[in-house]
Image: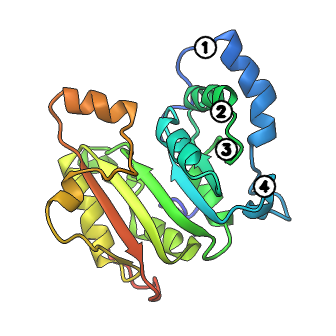
Amino acid sequence: MIGSEHDRGPVLHGRRKTRPLRPTRRRLVEQLLPQLQINPAAPDFEPISCFDFRPEQLWLEIGFGAGEHLAWQAAHNQTVGVIGAEPFINGVARLLAEIEQTGLKNVRIYPDDARTLINALPAASLDKCFLLFPDPWPKRRHHKRRFVQPDTLDALARILRPGAELRMATDHRGYGRWMLAHCLRHPAFEWPAECAADWRLRGADWPPTRYEVKSRDAGRDAVYYRFRRTGENQAGAQSP
């Protein structure tokens, strides 16, 4: 289970909304979101049954931002059920607009803190998980707010099946080292990279996000990690 530093449950740090939604986006939040929103607090919550078909796999994107990466993955993997968690309602509205325009049928949304959803998902239920350009919380006193922590990796290890992939990306050098150190020390994850290109370049099945393009134009290089869930027990994680 993922909890806060005082074991009171997840504490969300960050924004939920900025500027007011335009009428079209507000309509989507009011009318389309209820059709696609999942409720992990439901007593009979089962992610597979949230879709109108039986997905061959389940994927999760944590903090999908404006949703362009999630929409691309859903469009190119239509037999997969893709779940996105994002508390920022403006980003949710952007994704809803894309879904309405393209007619995507294999997306479900949790418009809140991903940690609550992760705690509710069944064990070994995910085949892939994405964590792309999360807030790096660069100040040392805020490092405890970073999403990648030993207890978070424990929770992800629980819901990822053996052989599943955990993808992470960041343009913050310190957070990149933090991500790699935590995952390398966790017994439930292995890093199959063989050369520098394996983490310096995105693969063909990894489209850029709007944030990434702006970051690259500003001269910041990103790292792209692919970790594999092993069959080992996830206990014993240590922080660097």
Callout 3: few (<14), some (14-19), or many (20+) C-alpha neighbours within 10 Å?
A: many
The image quadrant where one finds the N terminus is: bottom right
Q: Is residue 182 above or below residue 137?
A: below
Q: Identity of the amino acid at label 2? A: Ile
Q: Which residue is found at the position 47% from the left and 41% from the top?
A: 69
Residue 234, position in %: x, y?
Answer: 46, 82
Q: Identity of the amino acid at label 1? A: Pro
Mark 1 or mark 2: which is in front?
2
Q: Identity of the amino acid at label 3? A: Ile
Instruction: Identify the secondary structure beneath mark 4.
Output: helix
Q: Name the residue tied to disc 1.
A: 20
Label 1–label 2 contact, CB within 8 A: no
Q: Name the residue tied to disc 2.
A: 99
Q: Is residue 39 visible?
A: yes
- Describe residue 120's horizontal placement relative to residue 221 as left or right: right
Between the C-alphas of marks 2 and 4, the distance is 16 Å
Q: Quadrant of residue 225?
A: bottom left
